[in-house]
Amino acid sequence: MIKGKDIIIVGIQPWDIEIGSNCKNIALEFAKDNRVLYVNPPMDRVTRLKQKNKERIQKRIKIAKGKLSDIKKIEDNLWNLYPKTTIESINWITSHSFYKAMNKRNSKLLANNIKSAIQRLGFKDYILFNDSSMFLGLHLKKLLEPVLYTYYIRDNLVKVPYWKKHGERIEPNLIKMADVVVNNSEYYVDYSSEFNENSIMVGQGCDISMFNDAENKIEVSDEFKNIPSPVIGYVGSLTTLRLDIELLEHIANQRKEWSIVLVGPEDDSFKQSNLHQLPNVHFLGNKPMEELPSYIKGFDVAINPQVVNEITIGNYPRKIDEYLAMGKPIVATVTKAMEMFKEHVYLAHTKEDYVTLVEKALQEHTRVKASEQIQFANTHTWENSVKDIYLAMEKTLKQLA
Protein backbone atom coordinates (compact mmCIF):
# COMPACT_ATOMS: atom_id res chain seq x y z
CA MET A 1 0.00 0.00 0.00
CA ILE A 2 1.07 3.56 -0.73
CA LYS A 3 0.48 5.46 2.53
CA GLY A 4 1.44 8.84 3.89
CA LYS A 5 2.57 10.13 0.49
CA ASP A 6 1.78 13.30 -1.41
CA ILE A 7 0.14 12.64 -4.80
CA ILE A 8 -0.55 15.13 -7.59
CA ILE A 9 -3.18 14.12 -10.14
CA VAL A 10 -3.42 15.75 -13.57
CA GLY A 11 -5.92 14.71 -16.20
CA ILE A 12 -8.37 15.71 -18.88
CA GLN A 13 -11.49 16.07 -16.71
CA PRO A 14 -12.09 18.83 -14.13
CA TRP A 15 -13.39 17.94 -10.69
CA ASP A 16 -16.69 19.69 -11.40
CA ILE A 17 -17.44 17.55 -14.47
CA GLU A 18 -21.09 16.49 -14.56
CA ILE A 19 -20.50 12.87 -15.62
CA GLY A 20 -18.75 10.01 -13.84
CA SER A 21 -14.97 10.03 -13.86
CA ASN A 22 -12.43 7.25 -13.30
CA CYS A 23 -9.90 9.83 -12.21
CA LYS A 24 -12.13 11.31 -9.52
CA ASN A 25 -12.85 7.85 -8.11
CA ILE A 26 -9.13 7.10 -8.04
CA ALA A 27 -8.42 10.43 -6.32
CA LEU A 28 -10.95 9.63 -3.59
CA GLU A 29 -9.29 6.25 -3.01
CA PHE A 30 -5.81 7.79 -2.95
CA ALA A 31 -6.99 10.36 -0.39
CA LYS A 32 -7.95 7.67 2.13
CA ASP A 33 -4.26 7.17 2.97
CA ASN A 34 -2.41 10.03 1.23
CA ARG A 35 -2.58 13.77 0.64
CA VAL A 36 -3.89 14.42 -2.85
CA LEU A 37 -3.95 17.49 -5.10
CA TYR A 38 -6.36 17.05 -8.02
CA VAL A 39 -5.46 19.49 -10.80
CA ASN A 40 -8.20 20.63 -13.18
CA PRO A 41 -7.18 21.09 -16.83
CA PRO A 42 -6.31 24.75 -17.34
CA MET A 43 -8.77 26.97 -19.19
CA ASP A 44 -7.78 27.64 -22.80
CA ARG A 45 -8.25 31.01 -24.50
CA VAL A 46 -10.91 29.91 -27.01
CA THR A 47 -13.07 28.36 -24.28
CA ARG A 48 -12.67 31.48 -22.17
CA LEU A 49 -13.91 33.67 -25.02
CA LYS A 50 -16.67 31.46 -26.45
CA GLN A 51 -18.14 30.26 -23.14
CA LYS A 52 -17.51 33.33 -21.01
CA ASN A 53 -21.17 33.59 -19.97
CA LYS A 54 -21.34 30.06 -18.58
CA GLU A 55 -21.29 29.80 -14.79
CA ARG A 56 -18.43 27.30 -14.83
CA ILE A 57 -16.24 29.61 -16.95
CA GLN A 58 -17.22 32.69 -14.95
CA LYS A 59 -15.92 30.94 -11.87
CA ARG A 60 -12.60 30.24 -13.58
CA ILE A 61 -12.32 33.84 -14.76
CA LYS A 62 -12.83 35.05 -11.17
CA ILE A 63 -10.14 32.64 -10.01
CA ALA A 64 -7.78 33.89 -12.75
CA LYS A 65 -8.36 37.46 -11.53
CA GLY A 66 -7.68 36.49 -7.92
CA LYS A 67 -11.27 37.10 -6.78
CA LEU A 68 -11.66 33.48 -5.69
CA SER A 69 -9.12 31.03 -4.28
CA ASP A 70 -7.53 28.68 -6.80
CA ILE A 71 -7.40 25.86 -4.23
CA LYS A 72 -10.58 24.26 -2.89
CA LYS A 73 -10.57 21.63 -0.17
CA ILE A 74 -12.83 18.74 -1.20
CA GLU A 75 -12.39 16.67 1.95
CA ASP A 76 -9.68 15.70 4.40
CA ASN A 77 -6.46 14.99 2.44
CA LEU A 78 -7.97 16.07 -0.91
CA TRP A 79 -7.64 19.47 -2.60
CA ASN A 80 -8.73 20.67 -6.04
CA LEU A 81 -6.58 23.16 -7.96
CA TYR A 82 -8.08 25.52 -10.55
CA PRO A 83 -5.06 26.74 -12.55
CA LYS A 84 -5.12 30.53 -12.78
CA THR A 85 -3.27 30.79 -16.07
CA THR A 86 -5.11 30.70 -19.39
CA ILE A 87 -3.29 28.54 -21.93
CA GLU A 88 -3.38 28.91 -25.69
CA SER A 89 -5.67 26.81 -27.90
CA ILE A 90 -3.23 24.99 -30.17
CA ASN A 91 -4.79 21.81 -31.52
CA TRP A 92 -5.43 23.52 -34.88
CA ILE A 93 -1.70 23.98 -35.49
CA THR A 94 -0.39 21.80 -38.34
CA SER A 95 3.34 22.56 -38.00
CA HIS A 96 4.89 20.01 -35.65
CA SER A 97 7.72 22.32 -34.60
CA PHE A 98 5.37 25.24 -33.86
CA TYR A 99 2.96 22.95 -32.00
CA LYS A 100 5.84 21.51 -30.00
CA ALA A 101 7.00 24.97 -28.90
CA MET A 102 3.51 26.14 -27.97
CA ASN A 103 2.69 22.92 -26.12
CA LYS A 104 5.87 23.26 -24.07
CA ARG A 105 4.90 26.84 -23.23
CA ASN A 106 1.44 25.71 -22.11
CA SER A 107 3.00 22.96 -19.99
CA LYS A 108 5.32 25.44 -18.27
CA LEU A 109 2.37 27.68 -17.41
CA LEU A 110 0.50 24.73 -15.90
CA ALA A 111 3.59 23.53 -14.03
CA ASN A 112 4.06 26.96 -12.47
CA ASN A 113 0.48 26.90 -11.19
CA ILE A 114 1.03 23.43 -9.72
CA LYS A 115 4.35 24.47 -8.10
CA SER A 116 2.62 27.39 -6.41
CA ALA A 117 -0.09 25.10 -5.03
CA ILE A 118 2.25 22.39 -3.75
CA GLN A 119 4.40 25.03 -2.03
CA ARG A 120 1.35 26.41 -0.22
CA LEU A 121 0.16 22.91 0.71
CA GLY A 122 3.63 21.80 1.76
CA PHE A 123 3.79 18.80 -0.57
CA LYS A 124 7.16 16.99 -0.58
CA ASP A 125 8.61 14.06 -2.57
CA TYR A 126 5.35 13.76 -4.48
CA ILE A 127 4.08 11.15 -6.90
CA LEU A 128 2.64 12.48 -10.19
CA PHE A 129 -0.34 10.52 -11.55
CA ASN A 130 -1.39 11.47 -15.08
CA ASP A 131 -4.82 10.41 -16.32
CA SER A 132 -4.50 10.56 -20.13
CA SER A 133 -3.27 14.18 -20.32
CA MET A 134 -0.86 13.38 -23.15
CA PHE A 135 -0.25 16.92 -24.41
CA LEU A 136 0.28 18.98 -21.25
CA GLY A 137 1.61 15.90 -19.48
CA LEU A 138 4.47 15.44 -21.94
CA HIS A 139 6.77 17.88 -20.11
CA LEU A 140 5.53 17.62 -16.52
CA LYS A 141 7.99 14.94 -15.44
CA LYS A 142 10.90 17.27 -16.21
CA LEU A 143 9.16 20.42 -14.99
CA LEU A 144 7.86 19.04 -11.68
CA GLU A 145 10.51 16.36 -10.95
CA PRO A 146 8.26 13.90 -9.08
CA VAL A 147 9.73 10.86 -7.33
CA LEU A 148 7.48 8.75 -9.58
CA TYR A 149 5.61 9.54 -12.79
CA THR A 150 2.62 7.24 -13.45
CA TYR A 151 0.65 7.39 -16.70
CA TYR A 152 -2.89 5.95 -16.71
CA ILE A 153 -4.56 4.72 -19.93
CA ARG A 154 -8.31 4.00 -19.87
CA ASP A 155 -9.41 5.00 -23.38
CA ASN A 156 -8.05 4.72 -26.90
CA LEU A 157 -7.94 8.50 -27.15
CA VAL A 158 -5.37 8.56 -29.95
CA LYS A 159 -8.09 7.26 -32.30
CA VAL A 160 -10.53 10.05 -31.39
CA PRO A 161 -10.21 12.86 -33.98
CA TYR A 162 -9.29 15.67 -31.54
CA TRP A 163 -6.56 13.63 -29.87
CA LYS A 164 -5.42 11.74 -32.96
CA LYS A 165 -4.04 14.78 -34.78
CA HIS A 166 -1.10 15.20 -32.41
CA GLY A 167 -1.64 12.30 -30.01
CA GLU A 168 -0.43 9.50 -32.28
CA ARG A 169 2.94 11.27 -32.30
CA ILE A 170 3.03 12.53 -28.72
CA GLU A 171 1.54 9.77 -26.55
CA PRO A 172 4.18 7.13 -27.41
CA ASN A 173 6.86 9.60 -26.29
CA LEU A 174 5.06 10.21 -23.01
CA ILE A 175 4.64 6.48 -22.43
CA LYS A 176 8.37 5.97 -22.96
CA MET A 177 9.31 8.56 -20.36
CA ALA A 178 6.78 7.45 -17.73
CA ASP A 179 8.20 5.42 -14.87
CA VAL A 180 5.17 3.10 -14.95
CA VAL A 181 2.08 2.85 -17.18
CA VAL A 182 -1.12 1.47 -15.65
CA ASN A 183 -3.99 0.32 -17.88
CA ASN A 184 -7.62 -0.71 -17.34
CA SER A 185 -7.65 -3.13 -20.31
CA GLU A 186 -5.35 -5.83 -21.66
CA TYR A 187 -5.71 -4.18 -25.06
CA TYR A 188 -4.09 -1.02 -23.71
CA VAL A 189 -1.37 -3.08 -21.99
CA ASP A 190 -0.45 -4.50 -25.40
CA TYR A 191 -0.36 -0.97 -26.84
CA SER A 192 1.67 0.69 -24.07
CA SER A 193 4.08 -2.24 -23.80
CA GLU A 194 5.35 -1.41 -27.28
CA PHE A 195 6.90 1.73 -25.79
CA ASN A 196 7.38 0.90 -22.10
CA GLU A 197 7.89 -2.61 -20.76
CA ASN A 198 6.73 -1.47 -17.30
CA SER A 199 3.07 -1.50 -18.41
CA ILE A 200 0.64 -3.04 -15.93
CA MET A 201 -3.01 -4.12 -16.03
CA VAL A 202 -4.85 -2.67 -13.00
CA GLY A 203 -8.44 -3.47 -13.94
CA GLN A 204 -11.37 -1.13 -13.55
CA GLY A 205 -13.30 0.09 -10.59
CA CYS A 206 -17.03 0.60 -10.68
CA ASP A 207 -19.39 2.06 -8.09
CA ILE A 208 -22.22 -0.43 -8.29
CA SER A 209 -23.81 0.35 -4.93
CA MET A 210 -26.99 1.74 -6.53
CA PHE A 211 -27.37 -1.49 -8.53
CA ASN A 212 -27.50 -3.62 -5.38
CA ASP A 213 -30.88 -5.36 -5.35
CA ALA A 214 -30.08 -7.99 -2.74
CA GLU A 215 -33.20 -7.08 -0.74
CA ASN A 216 -35.38 -6.89 -3.87
CA LYS A 217 -36.30 -3.26 -3.19
CA ILE A 218 -35.70 -1.91 -6.68
CA GLU A 219 -38.99 -1.57 -8.54
CA VAL A 220 -39.34 -1.98 -12.30
CA SER A 221 -40.12 1.32 -14.01
CA ASP A 222 -43.79 1.91 -14.83
CA GLU A 223 -42.78 2.42 -18.47
CA PHE A 224 -42.53 -1.36 -18.85
CA LYS A 225 -46.22 -1.94 -18.12
CA ASN A 226 -47.21 -1.69 -21.78
CA ILE A 227 -44.08 -3.33 -23.21
CA PRO A 228 -44.49 -7.06 -23.97
CA SER A 229 -41.96 -9.60 -22.68
CA PRO A 230 -39.34 -10.75 -23.28
CA VAL A 231 -37.52 -7.42 -23.03
CA ILE A 232 -34.04 -7.17 -24.54
CA GLY A 233 -32.54 -3.96 -23.23
CA TYR A 234 -29.65 -1.52 -23.30
CA VAL A 235 -28.86 1.53 -21.14
CA GLY A 236 -26.35 4.18 -22.16
CA SER A 237 -25.66 6.78 -24.82
CA LEU A 238 -27.08 5.77 -28.18
CA THR A 239 -24.29 6.81 -30.53
CA THR A 240 -23.07 5.24 -33.76
CA LEU A 241 -19.52 5.91 -32.62
CA ARG A 242 -19.98 3.01 -30.19
CA LEU A 243 -23.17 1.08 -31.07
CA ASP A 244 -24.21 -0.99 -34.08
CA ILE A 245 -27.58 0.16 -35.50
CA GLU A 246 -27.59 -2.60 -38.14
CA LEU A 247 -27.18 -5.21 -35.40
CA LEU A 248 -30.14 -3.82 -33.44
CA GLU A 249 -32.29 -3.78 -36.59
CA HIS A 250 -31.34 -7.41 -37.28
CA ILE A 251 -32.38 -8.55 -33.80
CA ALA A 252 -35.67 -6.64 -33.98
CA ASN A 253 -36.51 -8.00 -37.46
CA GLN A 254 -35.53 -11.59 -36.71
CA ARG A 255 -37.50 -11.80 -33.48
CA LYS A 256 -40.56 -9.57 -33.76
CA GLU A 257 -41.96 -11.10 -30.57
CA TRP A 258 -39.07 -9.59 -28.59
CA SER A 259 -39.25 -6.02 -27.30
CA ILE A 260 -36.03 -4.10 -27.85
CA VAL A 261 -35.81 -1.36 -25.20
CA LEU A 262 -33.19 1.39 -25.54
CA VAL A 263 -32.64 3.78 -22.62
CA GLY A 264 -30.44 6.80 -23.21
CA PRO A 265 -29.86 9.95 -25.27
CA GLU A 266 -29.67 9.53 -29.06
CA ASP A 267 -27.24 11.03 -31.55
CA ASP A 268 -28.55 12.24 -34.92
CA SER A 269 -27.89 8.90 -36.64
CA PHE A 270 -29.99 7.03 -34.09
CA LYS A 271 -32.76 9.65 -34.32
CA GLN A 272 -32.88 9.21 -38.10
CA SER A 273 -32.50 5.42 -38.11
CA ASN A 274 -35.04 2.88 -39.27
CA LEU A 275 -35.22 1.59 -35.69
CA HIS A 276 -37.88 4.21 -35.00
CA GLN A 277 -40.11 2.58 -37.63
CA LEU A 278 -39.99 -0.88 -36.03
CA PRO A 279 -42.98 -1.57 -33.75
CA ASN A 280 -41.03 -3.76 -31.33
CA VAL A 281 -38.28 -1.19 -30.70
CA HIS A 282 -38.94 1.19 -27.80
CA PHE A 283 -36.90 4.33 -27.19
CA LEU A 284 -37.42 5.46 -23.59
CA GLY A 285 -35.12 8.48 -23.70
CA ASN A 286 -32.45 9.80 -21.37
CA LYS A 287 -32.88 9.02 -17.67
CA PRO A 288 -31.19 10.25 -14.48
CA MET A 289 -28.42 7.94 -13.32
CA GLU A 290 -30.25 7.06 -10.11
CA GLU A 291 -33.22 5.72 -12.10
CA LEU A 292 -31.24 3.32 -14.30
CA PRO A 293 -31.51 0.33 -11.91
CA SER A 294 -35.30 0.37 -12.27
CA TYR A 295 -34.90 0.10 -16.06
CA ILE A 296 -32.25 -2.62 -15.98
CA LYS A 297 -34.48 -4.60 -13.63
CA GLY A 298 -37.14 -4.58 -16.35
CA PHE A 299 -34.82 -6.34 -18.82
CA ASP A 300 -35.08 -10.08 -19.40
CA VAL A 301 -31.72 -9.92 -21.19
CA ALA A 302 -29.28 -6.99 -21.15
CA ILE A 303 -27.15 -6.34 -24.23
CA ASN A 304 -24.13 -4.30 -25.26
CA PRO A 305 -24.46 -4.10 -29.08
CA GLN A 306 -21.09 -2.51 -29.53
CA VAL A 307 -19.62 -1.70 -32.91
CA VAL A 308 -15.97 -2.76 -33.02
CA ASN A 309 -13.69 0.06 -34.13
CA GLU A 310 -10.43 1.70 -33.10
CA ILE A 311 -12.19 3.66 -30.36
CA THR A 312 -14.20 0.83 -28.77
CA ILE A 313 -12.00 -2.24 -29.20
CA GLY A 314 -10.05 -1.76 -25.98
CA ASN A 315 -12.63 0.02 -23.83
CA TYR A 316 -13.61 -1.44 -20.48
CA PRO A 317 -17.44 -1.56 -20.55
CA ARG A 318 -18.54 -0.35 -17.12
CA LYS A 319 -22.18 -0.97 -18.00
CA ILE A 320 -21.42 -4.72 -18.01
CA ASP A 321 -20.60 -4.49 -14.30
CA GLU A 322 -23.90 -2.69 -13.73
CA TYR A 323 -25.80 -5.43 -15.57
CA LEU A 324 -23.90 -8.12 -13.67
CA ALA A 325 -24.54 -6.42 -10.32
CA MET A 326 -28.26 -6.84 -10.95
CA GLY A 327 -27.88 -10.48 -11.92
CA LYS A 328 -29.11 -10.05 -15.47
CA PRO A 329 -28.20 -12.44 -18.32
CA ILE A 330 -26.01 -10.51 -20.76
CA VAL A 331 -25.11 -10.76 -24.43
CA ALA A 332 -22.25 -8.52 -25.59
CA THR A 333 -19.97 -8.07 -28.57
CA VAL A 334 -16.68 -9.89 -28.15
CA THR A 335 -13.55 -7.73 -27.81
CA LYS A 336 -10.22 -8.23 -26.06
CA ALA A 337 -11.49 -6.16 -23.12
CA MET A 338 -14.54 -8.43 -22.82
CA GLU A 339 -12.49 -11.62 -22.49
CA MET A 340 -12.30 -11.21 -18.71
CA PHE A 341 -16.12 -11.48 -18.58
CA LYS A 342 -16.41 -14.66 -20.67
CA GLU A 343 -17.44 -16.87 -17.73
CA HIS A 344 -20.42 -14.63 -16.97
CA VAL A 345 -21.42 -13.05 -20.29
CA TYR A 346 -22.48 -14.55 -23.63
CA LEU A 347 -20.04 -13.14 -26.19
CA ALA A 348 -21.18 -12.67 -29.79
CA HIS A 349 -19.05 -12.31 -32.93
CA THR A 350 -21.87 -11.66 -35.42
CA LYS A 351 -25.41 -10.34 -35.58
CA GLU A 352 -26.59 -13.92 -36.07
CA ASP A 353 -24.78 -14.87 -32.85
CA TYR A 354 -26.77 -12.22 -30.99
CA VAL A 355 -30.11 -13.81 -31.84
CA THR A 356 -28.88 -17.30 -30.93
CA LEU A 357 -27.25 -16.18 -27.68
CA VAL A 358 -30.19 -14.05 -26.53
CA GLU A 359 -32.40 -17.12 -26.95
CA LYS A 360 -29.86 -19.15 -25.00
CA ALA A 361 -29.71 -16.53 -22.24
CA LEU A 362 -33.50 -16.50 -21.93
CA GLN A 363 -33.55 -20.29 -21.53
CA GLU A 364 -30.47 -20.90 -19.35
CA HIS A 365 -30.44 -18.11 -16.77
CA THR A 366 -30.88 -19.25 -13.17
CA ARG A 367 -30.69 -17.78 -9.67
CA VAL A 368 -27.37 -19.53 -9.20
CA LYS A 369 -25.94 -17.86 -12.30
CA ALA A 370 -27.32 -14.51 -11.16
CA SER A 371 -25.64 -14.93 -7.78
CA GLU A 372 -22.31 -15.76 -9.44
CA GLN A 373 -22.62 -12.66 -11.64
CA ILE A 374 -23.27 -10.43 -8.64
CA GLN A 375 -20.27 -11.84 -6.78
CA PHE A 376 -18.05 -11.27 -9.82
CA ALA A 377 -19.25 -7.67 -10.27
CA ASN A 378 -18.51 -6.96 -6.61
CA THR A 379 -14.82 -7.72 -7.17
CA HIS A 380 -14.57 -4.76 -9.57
CA THR A 381 -14.36 -2.08 -6.91
CA TRP A 382 -12.28 1.09 -6.94
CA GLU A 383 -10.56 -0.17 -3.81
CA ASN A 384 -9.34 -3.28 -5.65
CA SER A 385 -8.29 -1.35 -8.75
CA VAL A 386 -6.35 1.21 -6.71
CA LYS A 387 -4.64 -1.61 -4.78
CA ASP A 388 -3.27 -2.83 -8.11
CA ILE A 389 -2.18 0.72 -8.98
CA TYR A 390 -0.41 0.91 -5.62
CA LEU A 391 1.38 -2.39 -6.28
CA ALA A 392 2.59 -1.15 -9.67
CA MET A 393 3.82 2.12 -8.16
CA GLU A 394 5.47 0.44 -5.14
CA LYS A 395 7.36 -2.00 -7.34
CA THR A 396 8.56 0.82 -9.59
CA LEU A 397 9.62 3.02 -6.65
CA LYS A 398 11.78 0.16 -5.37
CA GLN A 399 13.36 -0.22 -8.81
CA LEU A 400 14.10 3.51 -8.95
CA ALA A 401 15.59 3.62 -5.43
Image (spheres, grey):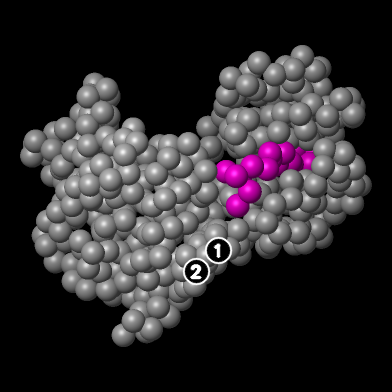
The residue closer to the viewer here, 50 or 298, is: 50
Residue farthest to the left, as pictured: 66
Task: Tell me the amino acid under the disc marked 1.
Answer: Val
Question: In the image, 19: left or right of 291?
Answer: left
Where disc 1 sits, the SS reads helix
User: Quick one: quadrant of the C terminus?
Assistant: bottom left
Judging by the rendered image, the residue that carries numbered circle 2 is 199
Q: CA distance from mark 1 to mark 2?
A: 6 Å
Q: Is residue 258 above or below residue 331?
A: above
Question: In the image, 388: left or right of 230?
Answer: left
User: Quick one: quadrant of the N terminus?
Assistant: bottom left
Judging by the rendered image, the residue that carries numbered circle 1 is 189
Identify the image quadrant of residue 357. Answer: top right
Question: In the image, 214: left or right of 166?
Answer: right
The residue closer to the viewer here, 177 or 363, is: 177
The answer to whether mark 1 and mark 2 are in CB contact below 8 A is: yes
Residue occupying the point 52% across, 49% down = 156
Where disc 2 sits, the SS reads strand
The residue closer to the viewer here, 172 or 125, is: 172
- How far from the left and from the top, in percent, is residue 237? 58, 33
Task: Tell me the amino acid under the disc marked 2.
Answer: Ser
Identify the image quadrant of residue 376. Answer: bottom right
Q: Specify the segment rendered in magenta.
A: 299-314
